[in-house]
Image: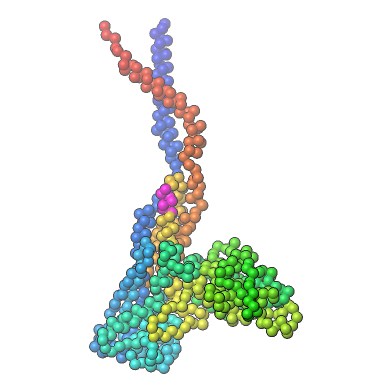
Amino acid sequence: MAAPGAAATDLEVVRGKRAALFFAAVAILVGLPLWWKTTETYRAPLPYSQISGLNALQLRLTVPITVVFTRESVPLDDQEKLPFTVVHERDIPLKYKMKIKCRFQKAYRRALEHEEEALSLGSMQEAETVLAEPQKQAEGSLTVYVISENSSLLPQDMMSYIGPERTAVVRGITHREPFNIVGRRVIQVAQAMSLTEDVLTAALADHLPEDKWSSDKRRPLKSSLGYEITFSLLNPDPKSHDVHWDIEGAVRRYVQPFLSALSAAGNFSVDSQILYYAVLGVNPRFDPASSSYYLAAHSLPHVINPVESRLGSSAASLYPVLNFLLYVPELAHSPLYIQDKDGAPVATNAFHSPRWGGIMVYNVDPKAYNASELPVRVEVDMVQVMEVFLAQLRLLFGIAQPQMPLKCLFSGSKSEGLTTWELDRLLWARSVENVATATTTLTSLAQLLGKISNIVIKDNVASEVYRAVAAVQKAAEELASGHLASAFIASQEAVTSSERAFFDPSLLHLLYFPDDQKFAIYIPLFLPMAVPILLSLVKIFLETRKSWKKPEKTD
């Protein structure tokens, strides 16, 4: 009777071993991979090699220049060599990881009949009007007309002329290697109208070491898709001053034409407000010699913060806000003047703060107090005010007066307050800035995702990264081809996509979920199941090992 019982026991033992092995196999071969797959952090693939290659990207900024020679501008023998192309390339010496080269591509040709007739007129204004009618130049391109050395189109003491459009005029020469001398004059004019080291240094101020820029180069606003401009009238003493300003008419006549000419660089919105009892945060000092009050240069930075708290325009804005404040001082501190670092009164009685805006102090005519009772009605001269604010607006966008070559006549800006080639120069600077910003953003994102492995990378984030890399590469190609408009659009897309990927909220979901928290969650779940399986496997292993060592009985 013992044998069947022993056999049944052995069968149960075998079944137990098989069950333990089966549970262990299911847990290891099915459960563990399934758990690993369902709990792993999803990370879409990113173009890490292409992102690292962007740091070694070489920007070649090509400026197409058409050089047109009139009949008597160079000797006849040299005119027979036309047309041909000359390329002048130079490095921009910036301490930046991205190499930048400026490439002037000069296409020499003879003047057409209508160009000859236009350049034979009595004044440059008439010639420019005729030359501008049949042609429309592309953004970033220039046309330089070479006239006779003795032409009366320019004053005799002037060697070149720069107009408000993408055109210039230089004098030719009839001896001593004319093409070389004219070529140097063309380069001087082209540099003044397009790219200079100062323009690119200001554009890359956030990416260069501090020894490469000064506080003046910090003036330009950072590139953005849009800007908000707010004009504020500050009347701290409404009991004494009844101030009226025609801000709507002034914006329509002076500001809107300027912004329309600048529309290629971004979208603009303009609003205005009047703030009563808004005083400056600094008490003016009295000058007995002139019986007036003044604000010293060192106290001007302390003026902005107390006033900014009253503006309230930048809190809910998605775009950079430019504030232009017209301050009418209270009667107790009138007249009020702003002094420069040398203690001399500022001619405009205004100052501006980089990337913030400007403030102008508007004093009331002292005769007005004798003619009427308080409050005195004050009619603001908007022409005087807008001249100051438009000059500050140009500085805030980095549109400074160009450095003209020697003996060069500059026609001045157009009625909009902006020349066409100044807009091109701004687009050059913005394109380079956007490429640098997008490259820095993508590099930082790649380094962050490489160091922290438990950040989820969704497909939409990866697609934005791929789109940004492609846009940077396209912008670089368009800049090298001299297509400024398409290069600027591509650079804007690169910045938008890179920042959209960098600030995607999904990147923060598992950022603060370290490994010790994972163990704290999963150990109570798997330990009760794993311990019996492990003990069974150990027991089976020991029994199997014991059976191998047990000697067999022989008769």
Q: Is residue 372 above or below residue 58?
A: below
Give residue 227's quadrant in the image: bottom right
Residue 493 visible from this viewpoint: no
Residue under the point 46% across and 40% down: 515
Residue under the point 66% across and 69% down: 279
On the image, the x and y values in percent for residue 478 come to 37, 68
Residue under the point 43% across and 74% down: 424
Residue under the point 44% across and 47% down: 452
Q: How is the image coloured?
A: rainbow
Give residue 491's quadrant in the image: bottom left
On the image, the x and y values in percent for residue 231 come to 60, 72
Of 526 and 278, which appears nearest the observer? 278
On the image, the x and y values in percent for residue 126 come to 44, 90
Total numbered labels: 0
Q: Quadrant of the N terminus?
A: top left
Q: Is residue 449 magenta?
A: yes
Residue 381 visible from this viewpoint: yes
On the image, the x and y values in percent for residue 204 come to 43, 66
Task: Return the residue found at the far front.
Answer: 289
Provide the major secondary structure of the magenta segment: helix
Q: Quadrant of the C terminus?
A: top left
Q: Is residue 288 magenta?
A: no
Task: Return the residue found at the far left.
Answer: 77
Give residue 163's quadrant in the image: bottom left
Start-end of magenta stretch: 445-451
Of 453 and 19, which appears nearest the observer? 453
Q: Is residue 31 left or right of residue 77?
A: right
